[in-house]
Amino acid sequence: MKKAPTIRDVASAAGVSVSVVSRVLNPESGPVAPAKRDMVLGVIEELGYRPRSAARELSVGHTPTVGLVVADLANPFFAQLADRIVWEARSHGVQVVVMTTQEDPHLEADSLDTLLDRSVGGVIATPTGANVEKWARLQSLGVNVVFVDRTIPDLANVDLVSIENVDSARQATDYMLSLGHTRIGLISGPVSTSTGRARIQGYQAAHEKHSISIDPQLIRDVPFRGDGGGDAVGSLLSLANRPTGLIVANTAQVQSSVRRLVQMGVRIPEDLSVIVFDDNPWTEVTSPPLSVIRQPISMLAVHSLELVLGRMNGKLPETPRTVEVKADFVPRSSCAPLLLTPTR
Amino acid sequence: MKKAPTIRDVASAAGVSVSVVSRVLNPESGPVAPAKRDMVLGVIEELGYRPRSAARELSVGHTPTVGLVVADLANPFFAQLADRIVWEARSHGVQVVVMTTQEDPHLEADSLDTLLDRSVGGVIATPTGANVEKWARLQSLGVNVVFVDRTIPDLANVDLVSIENVDSARQATDYMLSLGHTRIGLISGPVSTSTGRARIQGYQAAHEKHSISIDPQLIRDVPFRGDGGGDAVGSLLSLANRPTGLIVANTAQVQSSVRRLVQMGVRIPEDLSVIVFDDNPWTEVTSPPLSVIRQPISMLAVHSLELVLGRMNGKLPETPRTVEVKADFVPRSSCAPLLLTPTR
DNA sequence: GACCGGAGTGGAACCGGTTCCACTTTTGTA
DNA sequence: TACAAAAGTGGAACCGGTTCCACTCCGGTC
């Protein structure tokens, strides 16, 4: 366990000053004679020297690091998002510190403090919806914030990358209505979240277009954590006038909801047509394969990283941006026309 | 965008020296008069002061940060592992920098360099199997390395946390043999990985116990990336004397393998009994639900973090540890006795 | 009443980079 | 040939913490 060489070791081994070595390391910071440059590079190679990022960070005041604050890595949607962001960041030479909130505002607040201590240049987050003042403080200290998937409407000056939530829900609902279903259950995220509200709105819009009134009992906004999806399924299917279609618009509850359907022995699509928000690879191997709203996760990752890096380089206009990417509706065999659905 | 207060701001606002403030921050580093302590804490609170971790890191030489080098967050197994580790680390006040290798030794090498620059105190990793000298160098610079899930036998002095791979594979194979199957396909990870080898070994051990010889054609070691699982399924099922059982012991290829089975219209368990390595929640909602080897992911996370933190605090004996945790075999309805399997 | 030891405090060096500035050498131009 | 501008270099301050050390008070003990 020997200690790593420092810039001064390199300088003295190469017979130059530390300034020269530093300029070799950061070419744009000043000129170096080509011959000397090669020589220094040789010494660096030979000694296996690597600059310590803490030292650099201390003197320049910030790091090429972004914080990623995500609800839950065990949810495949967030896991894939994180995967893409980490990947994309690396290709830009940027590091990612991943934190999870488990949807708990308290933990979220902790995470933000920690990221502040690390003086990250930017944060990409799926906010819980709380901690408004904390987010604002973060921004006032110069940390660039980009929300992805969801947002907090009360917070000004935040970039947002999301899918077209209203439209996606509208499209899924529209499809079911066109198949003749008139009683469609909706399991959404909490109305305290922007995605929850938007998807309910899309659901309503489709009904309006078809001039079909909505039974409020059919809309269930459930928390992301826990087993609310399964419970909602149970409760929806025990309604006197039970729905013939179901849209699960809460990615975190898809698994729970589907499991309950299987446990209850519900036949899909004979008893119930189903569409879920999630392009989880497993949706293809259930029987039948599920119709899904496919979220373009790579696009979300690319855009959010681009935004946060753009802000960090100051290469973006002041005004906050909202990027909405299209989500595809992928029909599979979990939906059938109402005519084929026998009434119980 | 005002700049954050420093320790000197706090000191002058409180009318004390920076030493005192520092001692308030790190109580074990020296005495402070109780009255003064409270006063300084008040000023800290009032100014919203937070110590910058870069400065501390620079002077103490290391950070309470561990690097997590994982193959692929899009794989639910690793995603859950990462989730648990990040979670567990937070409760110890430790940060986690997550990197992914996508099973590429080149990217793995990059990741290690980066972690070195960050002077992390420890690394938890699922190694690709390459970069032996790089790992050794990391250790020689005082970075504690804990491998999880897999290991590199050539590398001495590394802690390892894994499931009982040999035994798990043996158990799964044994179960199938007891059902009367004699031709059991095995899709494992590459033999260049410790898990690949161990699981094949367990498969062989079970056969020996039952005095059944193995047709080498039935063992397919496929890469983690790509679609090797699906291809292996196709090829196994087109053998003249096709297997009546299949064990997928490559977590990354379960999804691909199962998808191919579905696409080919293979009836489970009538045509083929199936066991997979993965306790992915989705295995319960396929039809039929799949028999699985359930990896105790939380245990893996807890142990690996405990090991790496223990090493960082120097509270562990020198000798490397190997922790093997039991993996449960969970029988579901994807396996049937051979008698019920019609011969084609 | 002199002496000792420990609590409490401040000064300043240090960690390993970056960068400003002053200085010397080269190059280019009139 | 003379002189200005540019290229190249080294010294030293600085970023914001930690920690060693010297120093001043105390109270307690013979």
Image (cartoon, coloured by chain):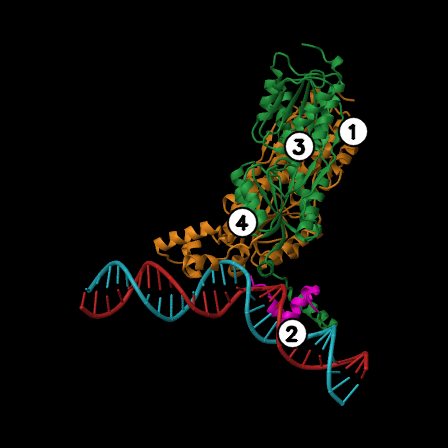
Chain colours: A orange, B green, C cyan, D red
Distance, label 1 to label 4, CA atoms, is: 49 Å
Q: In the image, which residues are magenta?
A: B1-30
- Circle 2 chain: B
Neighbourhood count class around disc 4 (C-alpha, 10 Å): few under 14, some 14–19, many 20 upward: many
Q: Which mark is residue B16?
A: 2
**x 57%, y 31%: residue:** B225
Instruction: Name the residue beneath numbered marker 3.
Output: A276
Say if mark 3 contacts mark 4, CB within 8 Å: no
Above or below — where is B334 with respect to B86? Answer: above
Q: Counting residues from the N terminus, which is met first, the one under dot 3 or under dot 4?
A: 3
Front position in the image: B87 or A244: B87
The three-letter amino acid code for the residue at tag 2 is Val
> CB atoms at circles 4 and 2 under 8 Å apart?
no
| Amino acid at circle 3 | Val
Between label 3 and label 2, give the one nearer the viewer: 2
Q: Earlier in the sequence, mark 1 or mark 4?
A: 1
Quarter location, residue C2:
bottom right
Kindly identify which numbered label has been placed on residue A241: 1
Q: Count the marks.
A: 4
* Of the two numbered discs 4 and 2 in the rendering, the one whose residue sits closer to the viewer: 2
Quarter occupied by residue B168: top right
| Mark 4, residue position | A308
Q: Circle 4 marks a residue in which chain?
A: A
**x 59%, y 66%: residue:** B6
User: Callout 3: few (<14), some (14-19), or many (20+) C-alpha neighbours within 10 Å?
Assistant: many
Whole-percent x, y for residue B248 in the image: 66, 26
Say yes or no: labels 1 and 2 on the same chain.
Answer: no
